[in-house]
Image (cartoon, grey):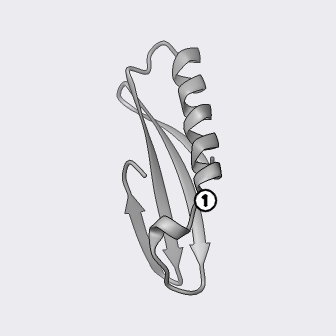
Amino acid sequence: MDLVCRRGRTLVVVEVKRRRVADHEERWVRRGQLNRVRAATAWLVREHRWARSSRVDLVTIEGWRVRIVRGA
């Protein structure tokens, strides 16, 4: 979990990954790591009563190319 942000009543957790070689975004984050991020996000939503929803985003960086994958 690299960033934890708030957009209105939505808790947004962002994982940032940088690679030198282009690859599919699905391979950037392993399933186990994604499950841990989702579990931590669920805990944060329970702890912060203002949060009505949550989302996990992935930001991939390849050289100067940045891509945002919403709801990873």
Q: Viewer-proximal residue, 40 or 31? A: 31
Looking at the image, the residue that sits furthest to the top is 49
Where residue 56 appears, as percent x and y from the top left, is 46, 44
In this view, 72 is above or below 39: below
In this view, 15 is above or below 8: below
Number of labelled discs?
A: 1
Residue at horizontal 59%, vertical 33%?
A: 39
Residue at horizontal 53%, vertical 84%?
A: 63
For label 1, the crowd category at 10 Å Cα-Cα, with few meaning under 14, some 14 to 19 and many 20 or more, is: few
Please identify the quarter of the rendering in which residue 19 is found.
Answer: bottom right
Where residue 6 appears, as percent x and y from the top left, is 45, 33
In this view, 64 is above or below 47: below
Under circle 1, the secondary element is: loop
Residue at horizontal 52%, vertical 49%?
A: 14
Where residue 65 appears, as percent x and y from the top left, is 44, 79
Looking at the image, the residue that sits furthest to the front is 31
Where residue 68 appears, as percent x and y from the top left, is 40, 62
Say which residue label 1 marks.
30
| Residue type at the position of mark 1 | Arg
* In-image side of 30 versus 52 (left or right): right
Residue at horizontal 58%, vertical 61%?
A: 29
